[in-house]
Image: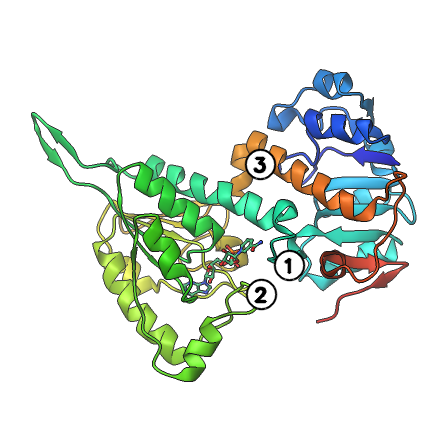
Amino acid sequence: MQIGIPRETLPGETRVAAIPDTVKKLIQAGHQVRVERAAGLAARYRDSDYESAGATLVDAAQALGAELVLKVRRPDAAELAQMAPQGILLGMLDPFDLDGLRPLAEAGLTAFALEAAPRTTRAQSLDVLSSQSNLAGYKAVLLATQYYGRIFPMMMTAAGTLKAARVVVLGAGVAGLQAIATARRLGAVVEASDVRPAAREQVESLGGKFIDVPYETDEEREIAQGTGGYARPMPAAWMARQAALVAERCKQADIVITTALIPGRPAPVLIQPDTVDAMKPGAVIVDMAVERGGNCPLSVAGQVVDHNGVTLVGLTNLPALLATDASALYARNLLDFLKLIIDAEGRYALPADDDIIQACLVCQGGQLLRSA
Ligand code: NAD
C-alpha cells in the first residue's frame, strides 16, 4: 500500500505518526511510504533518517493523498481537502466528538479512532491512550517540580533539614499511576484517590497511600466498578464524601496532580475553589484533565495561573512535550493496529467480528458509524 505520513498542523502538536524505525518496518512489509518533509522535525526525527529508512520525502498534498494516512490528530478542513476520496485514515480522532467526525465521513474516508480501542490484553500493544497517558503522567510531575519552589526528597543538610514534598494524585489510572511512581522516585510522600476499588492495590504497590472513601450502598459499589476498565459518574453522595476527604488531603499537600476522567463526559470536579483557597502558599496543582473541563474549576487550559500563591498548571497536550518518545510509542501502536487491517499479501482487508476494529472504526463509505 501507499502510506502517507503528513506533518501535523495543529498548533503545539510536535508529535509525528511514524518514526524512521516504523517506516523501515512498513517498507520491509512491502509498502511504499511517503513522508512529508519536516514531518518529524519537531519530534527530533530528521528527513534524512526517514529517507535512509526507505521513505520518499514529499509535500503535504502527496502525503495526505496516499491510500492510507497515519496521523496524530484529526485532519482539519484544509487537510481533508487534500485527502484521497475513499482513503483510509488512522489517528487519535476524538471518537466522542461527532461533529468533528462528520466531515471525515462526508469526505468518504474509512477512519479508525485509536482512542476507542477496548481495554483488553489483545489491544494493549495498540493502546494509544495508555502509551500517551503514561508519558503525560511522568511529565506532569516534572512540571510540578518546575513550578514548586522547594525540593521533593527529604534532605538533611548542615544548614537544616528539608521535608519531603507531600503529593496527592487524584485519579489512579494510567497517567495517575505513572505520576505516583515518578513522584515516589523523586522522594515525595504520595497519597492517591480513585473511584475504582482495583486502584487501591495498584497505588499501594507503588508505595502510595490510598485515600479511602468507603462505599455506603450497593449502588455505589456497583457503579465504582466502572465499565470496560473505565470509571462511571459516581452518585452525588459518594462524590460529596470524596470531596470532603480530598479537601482535607489537599490542604496538607504541596503538589496535587489530577487525572480523573470519565470517557465521553466532562471531567469530574474534584477540587473546589474554596479548597484551593485553603491550600498552602507555594503549592502546585497540575490539572491533567483541563482539556475536558478540568478537575478544578480554577485551572485554565493552556495556561499557568497563580491563585493566592497556589500555582495551577493547565498546560495541555503533555505528551507533545516529550515528542520523541511519545511519537515512538504512538508509531508502534499504529504499526500494531495496521496488522489487524492489512492481510498477508499487504492489502487492506477489514476483518469481520473483530472487537478492536468494531470499536475503532468511526466512519466508512460516507457513513458516520457513531451516534450520540
Ligand atoms: P481515564 O484516563 O479514563 O481516567 C483516569 C482515572 O480517573 C481512572 O482511573 C478513573 O477511575 C479515575 N476517576 C474517574 N472519576 C474519578 C473520581 N470522581 N475520583 C477519582 N478518580 C476518578 O482512565 P485510564 O487511565 O485510561 O485507565 C482506566 C483503567 O483502564 C485503569 O484501570 C487501567 O489500568 C485500565 N487499563 C487497562 C488496559 C488493558 O487491560 N489493556 C489498558 C489501559 C488501561
Helix, strand or loop status at disc 2:
loop
Residue that label 2 marks: 228
CA separation in Å, label 1 and label 2: 7 Å
Asked if the residue at tag 3 contacts the one at tag 1, i.e. Cβ–Cβ closer than 8 Å, the answer is: no
Residue that label 1 marks: 118
Q: Nearer the viewer, residue 233 or 182?
A: 182
Q: Is mark 2 within 8 Å of ligand 1?
A: yes
Q: Nearer the viewer, residue 45 or 83?
A: 45
Hey, what amino acid is under mark 3?
Answer: Ala
The residue lying at 68 percent from left, 29 percent from top is 19
Query: Which one is earlier in the sequence, the residue at label 2 or at label 3?
Result: 2
Q: Residues within 10 Å of mark 1 (few under 14, many from 20)?
A: many
Asked if the residue at tag 2 contacts the one at tag 1, i.e. Cβ–Cβ closer than 8 Å, the answer is: yes
Residue 367 on image: x %, y %:
86, 63
- Residue 235 shows in this picture: no
Residue that label 3 marks: 326
Q: Nearer the viewer, residue 277 or 80?
A: 80
The residue lying at 37 percent from left, 58 percent from top is 201
Query: Which one is earlier in the sequence, the residue at label 1 or at label 3?
Result: 1
Quarter holding the C terminus? bottom right
Hey, what amino acid is under mark 1?
Answer: Pro
Residue 79 on image: x %, y %:
80, 42
Between disc 1 and disc 3, the foreground one is 1
Residue 228 on image: x %, y %:
58, 65
Q: Say the numbered circle drawn on residue 319.
A: none
Helix, strand or loop status at disc 1:
loop
Residue 43 on image: x %, y %:
61, 28
Q: Residues within 10 Å of mark 2 (few under 14, many from 20)?
A: few
